[in-house]
Amino acid sequence: QVQLVESGGGLVQAGGSLRLSCAASGTIFTINTMSWYRQAPGKQRELVAAITTGGRTNYADSVKGRFTISRDNAKNMVYLQMNSLKPEDTAVYYCNAGWNTGWGIEGPYWGQGTQVTVSS
């Protein structure tokens, strides 16, 4: 089993920045992709960004150029730097992990979620 714990959410004004962190523990050797998903009220959960152990990344079109996903394999951490935030980025953000996931496939492991609220 893999445990994921997110941190870093909060309230920010439009145009501001936040950095989310996700710490992974447990059977880390069973995962190679870590992703961020988000779910806004009344909307389906969507992929925000994904990154493999080797550093290959995938971004939703809506966040390209504004968000950056990165990871520290030695610390089993993944980060999401969010710049130029918009009110439509408001959602609960979830860390997700799996093997060869993140490109249309959700991994089996989820964090508890962290709220990001962007005020206009």
Image (cartoon, grey):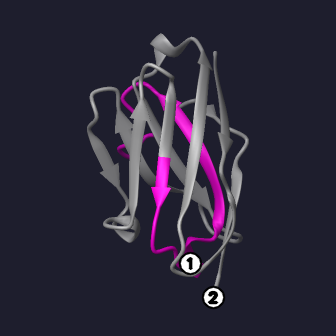
Of pointers 2 and 1, the one earlier in the residue sequence: 1
Crowdedness of circle 1 by 10 Å Cα count: few (<14), some, many (20+)? Answer: few
How much space separates mark 2 and mark 1, taking CA atoms? 10 Å
Taking depth in this image into account, of 51 and 14 the one nearest to the observer is 14
Q: Which mark is residue 120?
A: 2
Task: Identify the secondary structure beneath mark 1.
Answer: helix
In the picture provided, is 26 more to the left or to the right than 65?
right
The spot of residue 17 in percent (x, y) is 53, 67
Is 99 magenta? The answer is yes
Crowdedness of circle 2 by 10 Å Cα count: few (<14), some, many (20+)? Answer: few
Q: Residue at x 40, y 48 (%)?
A: 69
Q: Nearer the viewer, mark 2 or mark 1?
A: 2
Q: Which residue is mark 1?
A: 88
Height in image: 40 above or below 6?
Answer: below
Height in image: 27 above or below 34?
Answer: above
The spot of residue 1 in percent (x, y) is 64, 15
Taking depth in this image into account, of 77 and 35 the one nearest to the observer is 77
Q: Is residue 98 visible?
A: yes
The spot of residue 82 in percent (x, y) is 48, 61
The spot of residue 94 in percent (x, y) is 62, 47
In the picture provided, is 84 more to the left or to the right than 27?
left
Q: Residue at x 39, y 70 (%)?
A: 62
Q: Residue at x 57, y 11 (%)?
A: 27
Taking depth in this image into account, of 73 and 99 the one nearest to the observer is 73
Three-letter code, disc 1: Glu
Q: Residue at x 55, y 38 (%)?
A: 96
